[in-house]
Image (cartoon, coloured by chain):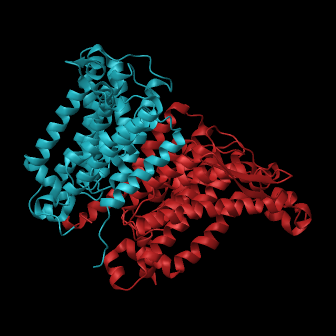
Amino acid sequence: MHSDLAIRVRQNFGFLTAVVLFCVVYLFYHLSHPKGFSSAVLIQNSNEVFTLALVAMAQTVPVLMGGLDLSVGALMTMVDCFASYLLSGAAGGTPLAMDFFGMQLSLGTLPGGVPGLLVGIVICLAIGTLGGLLNGVVVVYGRIQPIIATLATGAIYIGIALHLRPQPGGKIDEDLNWAITNSLGDFASTVHIFDDGAASWFAPVAWIPTPFVLLLLIALVVWVPFRRSVAGRTIYAVGSAEGAAYMSGLPIDRAKLIAFTLGGFLAACGGVFLAIQTSSGNADIPQAGAYTLNSIAAVVIGGTSLLGGSGSAIGSIFGALILRVISFTFRVFDIAPLLQPLFEGIILLGAVSISALRVLRIKNTLELFR
Amino acid sequence: MSALPASLKLSREDRPIAIAALFLVVILIAGTIYTWVRFGNAPLLSPNYLLLQLQIGAFLGIVAAGMMLVILISQIDLSAPWTLTAAAMMATAVGGFWAIPVALSVGLAVGIVNGLGVAYLRVPSMIFTLGVNAVMRGLMVAHTGGYAPQTEATPLMRSLAAERTFGIPNALFVWLAVSVAIVLLLRRAPLGRYIYAIGNKESAAYLAGVNTRLVTVICFALCGLTAGMAGVLLAGYSQKAYQGMGDAYLLPAIAAVVIGGTNILGGRGRYLGTLIGVILIVLLNSVLSIMDMPEAGRQAIYGSVIILMLLVYGRGERVTS
């Protein structure tokens, strides 16, 4: 029994380190924050973490397969720009038209009100999922290396985003913004459930931030079933040894397609949230790049191997949390903002160099070259 | 294909280069037809215009040359943007005679750090160079106080980057010198053989007696050096160093290497391909700007061209065993 636990700990060493590191830093943050342990601070934190956490989850799926997705930030940005049109919540509905090389194509009208918003969210998520599927098609049927294929598709997504929003702008329905980016109590009072959030049984959970609950839901409803499905297991197998996975008769092509599609869906969730949080759409190329690179950092800090085959999206959530909490802590201590990028870089380097301890344990030099 | 005479059959290394060169000609012709119909002239065919484009291409070309070495050993260097910027900022800050030596040492030092991290700590290059990039960015932000540096490039830097000798931009001579050095390294020096060997299978190269860690460090050091060199030229060209000056060079450099037929997984590729890849990207950009294409369309076309070219010749093998 004891040895079983020891093996599990050793197998999930990276993940457990990330969890412990996060808990320590976050506790420290709350202890030193003047308004620590309050709902307001939690809400603010979870709003700032959500998008990166989702983009990091999206990055995890291709990484588990031994690939890399350089388009997650671009895809997220594209969905963000779509959302800034589709979630405006105009009362009379939003007419959808497309200017296609000078031809005005009318695509019908998005209804106003809550149904319109729901349809808009579904369309946004569908667009992102489609983008992920396109990545998968290029990788699987085009047989192009994921890193370079997604570099190219990322440029296309950024192009579409820039076409939609040459300048930052757009509008998001205020109620939607309020409901999603505050506590559960505010959510309930905005959508008029549970006696507008005043129900007595609801009070103990009313302080929980809505983004946190959404993140938990996505992790439980999307990631956990995927992890247990044939496609999910195949992804891990492909990451460990693609040849062996093929010889075992696993559906490799289908699993890869599903992996990239799932990545697209998760990135789209992040994009929709970013639009709701900022109440606008912005085709910001540096920001898209920063999200992509931070997502890779979060994945690695969360204990997923860049070689593929081990790790999980849950770890990546903790990786994203650590990255963000570090910058929160800087704000509390009022460290000169100019030094922040330097500290962030050093901490990232330090965190990934911890894995170098593995090198010391290796007895046969050949084991280094995997 | 089998009906082709033997002399027309191209090796796996040469086919991408030939197709990329063909595509280069297609871009030139299409661009010329466009300008002829629209404006009644053909600037793309004037030597002066082409030289100007190549001068701008030299900065990308030098970054891509170093990047190719790293990609050949199946690693990647994501720290190029801020290595370039740091070198440029240090050069303008130091000024005088020592400007260029200092900038090149900065590039070399960053490259060596990258190499040590990847070769000895065995951190995946993707993440280690990303961290080094963040550290360099942090150092430069702290150094400049977040503002644009007020220092200027030295006359020598300006002359190297922006002036001409015998009507040919000096930057082209620098690019040529770097290119010749890389070709000699890859084709004539033992180190070149080691680089290809490591890219194909590092454990095999190790067992064959190659000091693979040292070669890895050297490749990263050279990549840092070329990034520093590009920083010197770019600062000379724009008269000063500025934040984010290197951001526009990372992905195009990788794309140029890959379009030129170098396998992103390492071990295969010729420098001529990288050269053509750089010219292709620069020319594509210039044709798109002549066409007055908005940034949105440019990005989309850029991505589509990379996918299209790789679909033609960059397809991998199916893993079946």
Viewport quadrant of the N terminus of chain B = bottom left
Point 81% across, 64% down: residue = A204
Above or below B145: residue B315: below
- The residue at the point 27 percent across, 53 percent down is B19
**Between residues B298 and B42, which one lies in front from this camera angle?**
B42
| B175 vs A303: above or below | above
Q: Is residue B119 visible?
A: no
Instruction: Please state if B183 lies on the left or on the right of A14 as rendered.
Output: left
Q: How many marks?
A: 0
User: What is the letter of the cyan chain?
Assistant: B
Q: Nearer the viewer, residue B230 or B126?
A: B230
Image-based side of B286 in relation to B298, left or right: left
Expressed as whole percent of the image width and height from the top left, the position of residue A366 reads 19, 66
* Residue B2, x across and y down, in percent: 18, 69
**Residue A244, quarter of the rendered image:** bottom left
Q: Nearer the viewer, residue A189 or A16?
A: A189
Report the chain shown in red: A
* Residue A337 seen anywhere in this rendered image of the structure: yes
In the image, residue A13 lies at what x, y percent? Answer: 43, 66
Quadrant position of the C terminus of chain B in the picture? bottom left
What's the residue at 41%, 65% (across, down)? A139
| Residue A126 percent coordinates (x, y) | 63, 64
* Left or right: residue A337 compared with residue A147: right
Which residue is more in the foreground, B130 or A183? Answer: B130
